[in-house]
Amino acid sequence: MGFRISSSSSSSCFCLQRALLPPLTAIATSTRALRRSNCIPSCSVSYQKFVEFALDETKRHTHLIPSPLQEKFSFMNSKDVKGSFSMLSFEAAKIRLLRSLIIQTETMQVLDFTVFPKAEYDVPIFCANFFTSAKTNIIVLDLNPVHDIINQYEYKEKYFKSLIPLGLKYAELFPWGGKLTSESIKFFSPIVIWTKFTSNPQKYDILYSAFREYYKVWLELICKAVKETDESQIFHNLEAQHRYLTWRAEKDPGRGVLKKLIGDTLAKDMLRSFLFNGVDELGSKTFNDYFPQYCCQEGNLNKKGNIIGKSFENRPWNARGEFIGNRFSNWFCIFIYGILHVYVRLLL
């Protein structure tokens, strides 16, 4: 039975009866490959159930079609054959790309699961990046905003106002994970879960609960989203997503792990062609075009090419979802302005 996209109005939920959805051979193949691998990680969590839940839940709302990327990116071993890479990718009526990557080695497990909406929809990007070893976990779970929510009130109100209680619920359970730079914070929402914790079953259960709740919320948003017809707004959405991809492809913290496991060439291909697919197709602007501040004088750059600027050691949003990260900067500017004002009056 072939794959068919059901036709429906853009404002209605893009649903398909589950009985009409054929078995997804790609899922079964990838799952078997993962089970065949010789990698038995020392950590006690399996991220396979996270992916299976997301796929099952997505199929309740839309008709998934295997992405052409699935032919190239499905399964591979690391250079030392002690690690495995399991990949899946799909498309749908409102989804440009749903893709997942699970890495398993003897000492760690990684989940990178992201869903990108099509440019006709300004819905946030679902993002789950989990790193687990025997002793520690580094977690990012969020609905990454496509547009600026620090300065654009309307977009934040549209998608995040009603979600603040959900974010507060898990902010209490998962403390802020430490410093995030002022550059990267722009790609996160007020409900982001950014945390670190030692490995234990209870935390994994809570993380699984958070993943399910966040993903269900995201599916509701994409389901209700109305297709944009204004060409200028579609272009605006497309450029915003390309900017996001450009940042992630250049600054993704997993780059070093990929290089170590599969080599520089394959790592670059996986980053640009699979994980952040679209960075070479959706736009022609470069990293320096979007982020010219990285081209400033050498004295303002550190050795890693990151701007030496403010970092946030604590959650920079308050309980109402308002960004408070600039409060010190604003106060400092007022203070300096006051001193200058007094100095000028004394001179006069």
Image (cartoon, grey):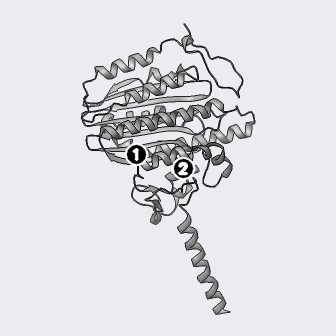
Up the image or down, 208 lies above or below 244; here it is: above
In space, the residues marked 2 and 1 are separated at their CA atoms by: 21 Å
Mark 2 element type: loop
> Which quarter of the figure has residue 281?
top right
Residue 194, position in %: x, y? 43, 48
Amino acid tagged 1: Pro
Q: In the rendered view, does 234 fall on the left or right side of 316? A: right
Amino acid tagged 2: Pro
> Which quarter of the figure has residue 260?
top left
Measuring 65% from the left and 35% from the top, which residue is drawn there? 121
Q: Nearer the viewer, residue 292 or 110?
A: 110
Q: How many marks?
A: 2
Measuring 58% from the left and 28% from the top, which residue is drawn there? 95
List the single residue furthest toward the top: 1
Measuring 44% from the left and 50% from the top, which residue is drawn there? 172
Measuring 56% from the left and 35% from the top, which residue is drawn there? 218
Q: Nearer the viewer, residue 62 or 92?
A: 62
Which residue is disc 1 drawn over? 253
Up the image or down, 29 lies above or below 344; here it is: above
